[in-house]
Amino acid sequence: MKALTLLSLLLVSFSLLANENNASLDTYLSDLKKKQFDYDYNKNDEESSQLRDSWIAPLQLSYSYSKSDPYGTEQTTQNAAIKMSQPIFQSGGIYYGIRYANALKLYNDYTIDVAKRKMIKDTVSILMQLKKADLQEKRQVLQIENADINLAQKQEEYLSGRLDSGFLDDAIIQRNVVKQALFDIQNSKEELITQFQVLSDLDYTKAPIPYLEFIKEEDFLKNNIVLKQNESQIEKDRYYKNVTIAKYLPQVSFNAGYNWQKSEGQLFSQTDGERDYYNYGVSVSMPLDINMFNDIASVRIDYLKSQVVQEDKKLELTKTFEQVLHNIDNIDKKIKLSSENMELYAKLLDDTKSLYDAGYKTEYDVENLQNSLDIQKIDTKIYEIDKQLELLTLYEMYVNNGE
């Protein structure tokens, strides 16, 4: 707990810098992936506009033309009409319907944002793992060199009679183990490269990884895109509840129409000629539905549940934040240990070089310690990437601009 408290005091701000050029993280996604998200946003705009204006009734246009000659005389009839039935009052339903459409648009935008951030996070995570794999590959090569040195030393001791074959077998086995580990690293790296190429157009060897700084817990929760999505869910459910209630209340509509008719050749009718007329008025309606109360109760439950979900998500994210801090604290301990080992190996290397110059140590001893020192330096770099991967978990849900 003391370590977590200390880390909390050190958390100042959170920013994302794409090394050197400070580029947007969108650049990590391929053009095809970005286009797909653009289409998702555009479709949401169109669907939201359609829903927002759905209360505006369409004009009904009609026209008909008929011709007949039942008595040997050609008769023609033409009819045309324009009609409308426009709701002008829905007990608040029009207002809440517009607000619901806007809330739904915001919710869907956040849903797309969350999906896009998840893909960006996956892409950057794979890139970081690739950089880490490069370091692990270099580290493993150094371990193989040390294993080769150990095997060479054991061979010399065995041939001189100072060592039995069991120790030589162990050295051979150890060399095989570290070589097989290198093959595993290279195989995993190839899989990561394939995954990265699916998500990004960048060359991973040239693409810089972003540098992630700490974030205060208060800011993480305040500017959290998942919580903002849940907040928009609450607003959406609230307005939908009101829309549902309003549809069972009185509705007033304005009705109007214009009609035109033209007849020619009518033998037994006085309707020959052209005429037109209009009509207008208002109507009041109110549905009586046996399922009204169940329908209203159902949407009210959805609204109440969305508020509970929000509080539960806050708790979950708080625990996630604490876990990330705990993991970073453990990584810092590893970094500290590597630093201590580097100091120890550096001193041993200096002493060994002096003894080598004096003829008391072999070149093998110098190379072994130099490799061990380099391994610790690489370990430190690997641990720093591990910290970035932990912080990436927070970034995925953090809104940089606070909007």
Image: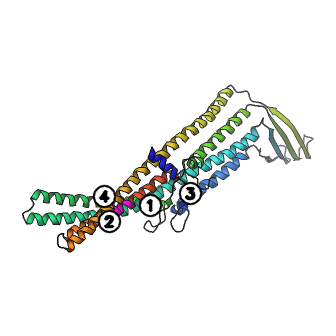
Instruction: Report the side of 372 relative to 4 (left or right).
Output: left
Residue sitting at x 79%, y 47%: 61
Residue 34 occupies quadrant: bottom right
Helix or strand or loop: what does disc 2 sit on?
A: helix
Can you tell which mark lies on residue 227?
A: none
Disc 1 to disc 4, C-alpha distance = 18 Å
Tell me whether the residue at label 1 lies in contact with that at label 2, contact meaning CB atoms closer than 8 angstroms. Answer: no
Q: Nearer the viewer, mark 3 or mark 4?
A: 4
Give the CA distance from mark 3 to mark 4: 35 Å
Looking at the rendered structure, which numbered label has been put on residue 184?
Answer: 4
Amino acid found under the numbered disc labelled 3: Gln
Query: Measured from the top left, where is residue 97 in percent x and y?
Result: 72, 41
* Residue ID at (49%, 55%): 121
Can the viewer see residue 301? yes
What range of the chain is rendered magenta? 376-381
Identify whether 127 is placed above or below 239.
below
Q: Which residue is mark 2?
A: 374
Question: What is the secondary structure assignment of the residue under circle 3?
Answer: helix
Extreme-top residue of the structure: 290
State the residue position of label 1. 127
Mark 1 or 2, which is nearer the eye? Answer: 2
Q: Secondary structure at mark 1?
A: helix
Between 200 and 387, which is closer to the camera in this rendering? Answer: 387
Contact (Cβ within 8 Å) of mark 2 with mark 3: no
In x, y percent, where is residue 381? 39, 61
- Amino acid tagged 4: Asp
Which residue matches tag 3? Answer: 36
Sequence order check, earlier mark of 3 and 4? 3
